[in-house]
Image (cartoon, coloured by chain):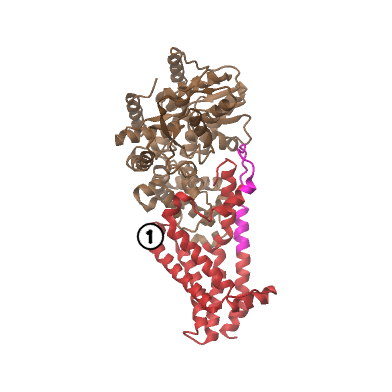
Amino acid sequence: MTLLDFARGPGLQWSLIILIAGVLWRLGGTILLNARKDLSRPRHKGTLTDGLKVIATRSLPAHQFEKRIRFQHFSGYAWHIALFISVLFFAPHIFFFESLLGFGWPGLPNGIILATAAIAVAILIALLIRRASHPVQRLISNADDYISILLVIAPLVTGILAFAHVGARYPTLLAVHLLSVEAMFVWFPFGKLMHAALTFPSRFQAGASYGRKGVRA
Amino acid sequence: MSTSPASLKDFRERLATLGKQPESTAKLSDEERVRRAGNSFLRELTNGMAVDLETCIHCGMCAEACHFYEATQDERYTPAHKFDPLRRYYRREMSPMRWLFRPFTRKVDANDLREWQVLVYDACTGCGRCDMMCPMGINISELINVVRNGIASAGLAPKEIQALQDEQQNKNSLFGVGADKLRELIGQLKSRQIVIPLDKAKADVLVLTTAVDVLLFNDALAALAKIMNRSGANWTLSSAAFEAANMGLISGDTAAEAKAIRRIVEQAKAVGAKTVVIAESGHAYQALRWEGAEDTGAELPFEVLAASEFVAREFDAGRLKLKKAENGRSVSYHDPCRLGRHGGVYEEPRRLLDAMGIERRETDSSKRENYCCGGGCSEYVIARAAPLRQKAFEIKKREFDKAAADAVVTSCSNCRVNLMIGAENARWEKPIDSLMVTVAANLTD
């Protein structure tokens, strides 16, 4: 079995199993902890709407706070969007999704994909440097923060190298790219990448709990 | 009867004696403290909080919402750092991934509890401004409150707060104000034709006041009495349960919090009160209005209203009439965090000010984004935190100066006393008034 065979076969299979089982385990284990029922009379009824609203509105910072967090706010948006463009609109990726889902969609020109991937890498490196140097972020960061960011950078960098055929033979580059994606899948349920799944319940409950007091969260 | 510099001086001297009292839990071993804190974390932590702990991405944006961080740029005051002991406990003992996290997560020890005592009591007023900032929607102030609970369980609450909590729990008084002092004040007010019905057998409305009002803000208590009488409500104050302040909520001792709540609930039931009105106190409102039912295990058999809510309701119903204030006065209303952000009472105070024709000048940050007074949740009683508190006060001062109103009005005795102390320290001349006093001065027949 070549490295590419491994990456395309058991590597991908097992990383997906760990990803799905791990996410279900972590979500389930968290939600099944002690629940507390609110017994006080709500000022405002509409928990569902309040929760859903905050899922949407918390993507935008409050006006008062905007000027202080502008860099983090926009850089966060920028790299997430750039990453999703690279993942979802690169033609070879679309072929892969089509093989799984049975349908595909139009891709973007390779030049645009390359540029967005490079932008995402540049922003992530800037954020990594900020995390290591900004007193607040340095204090509250742990190994997971650095590992997670490196594991998101890795598929982008290996993808660019594979696309450009730089550094090794193409099959090797492709295998390394796939393995880097699989490493991210494996890490996902154990580290902070889980926020992708947890942000929504977290925001929802903020909206619901403040909402019942009549406060817009 | 108004608050004079002399009575503020007397109150400040009283505050200074709090830290000199012997500590009630000084003999606990470090192992016992850690065990107690852990049990408290285990007891208090809910699945909702677990979701929040799991979701934090350590972005640090919450620091930008914290007045203590803004005032000092000290990274230790980052809200996400303040709940770190709870995060570590959760990862080691409760997380579904604890088998993996435990070897990589340092255990919380007694030194951590001592270090975090300063971070969660001196440098956090539980104002919840960070809750409004977090892009993940994490209820940060709730998590920090659980850390407070753990530290209080470990017998490590600051000695001033512990002393007040012990006094309330053991003597049913605060700052030495028990039923006798209340009766004395009621007698003094009666000689000024302000009648406070004490210990009526039956009443529709039970009013709660605070020791701070009895000692320092007689004007606010007298004003509330005047308003209640004018509204025609059948009301009473109870000598057995007149204190609205809840030191259990402040220290983090949930048993003490529940005990104080039960005392009020029993008294309200005894007099048949349908409504309990809480004098101007933010945390007391939060304790009874939003946590009382949880503390007693059942929905409360009466409605709980902040004084401003009650007065606005009476005004809306036509039972209270307000005249336009004289002199074209302008004010900036300071939202007490636990009435506003944690309580939902934003509009009633503003509606009353508008009804009196008082020009409102909002500060840049108000309502959900309002800055804390700097000494909320009784942080103002902690002597060693005075310099830090003053720095946070300066933020408020800058905002008030920019709004350039004639006075500041608030509806919380804690905020009022802290703003007055801050103003006195800074030699800042702005009047800090009570909303109830302002309303009472503009009542008409």
Residue span colored magenta: A23-49
Chain B tint in image: brown
For the N terminus of chain A, which image quadrant? bottom right
Label 1: which secondary element: loop
User: Where residue A206 appears, x then y in whole percent?
Assistant: 56, 49
Residue B34 in sight here: yes
User: Where residue B119 appears, x then y in whole percent?
Assistant: 40, 47
> Could you classify mark 1 by the number of other residues whose Cα lies within 10 Å: few (under 14), some (14-19), or many (20 or more)?
few
Residue identified by numbered label 1: A134
Figure label count: 1
User: On the image, which quarter does residue B327 sit in?
Assistant: top left
Q: Nearer the viewer, residue A74 or B248?
A: A74
Image position of B289 with respect to A90: above or below: above
Chain A tint in image: red
User: Where residue B280 appears, x then y in whole percent?
Assistant: 48, 30
Image position of B155 with respect to B271: above or below: below
Q: Chain of mark 1?
A: A
Q: Is residue A48 magenta?
A: yes
User: On the image, which quarter does residue A197 sit in?
Assistant: bottom right
Image position of A47 with respect to A166: above or below: above
Residue B22 in sight here: no
Label 1 amino acid? Answer: His
User: Where residue B170 appears, x then y in whole percent?
Assistant: 47, 28
Image position of B34 with respect to A162: above or below: above
Q: Among all residues in the image, which is located at the extreme front?
A: B328
Q: Is residue B96 magenta?
A: no
Q: Residue at x 39, y 19 (%)?
A: B1
Q: Nearer the viewer, residue B19 or A51?
A: A51
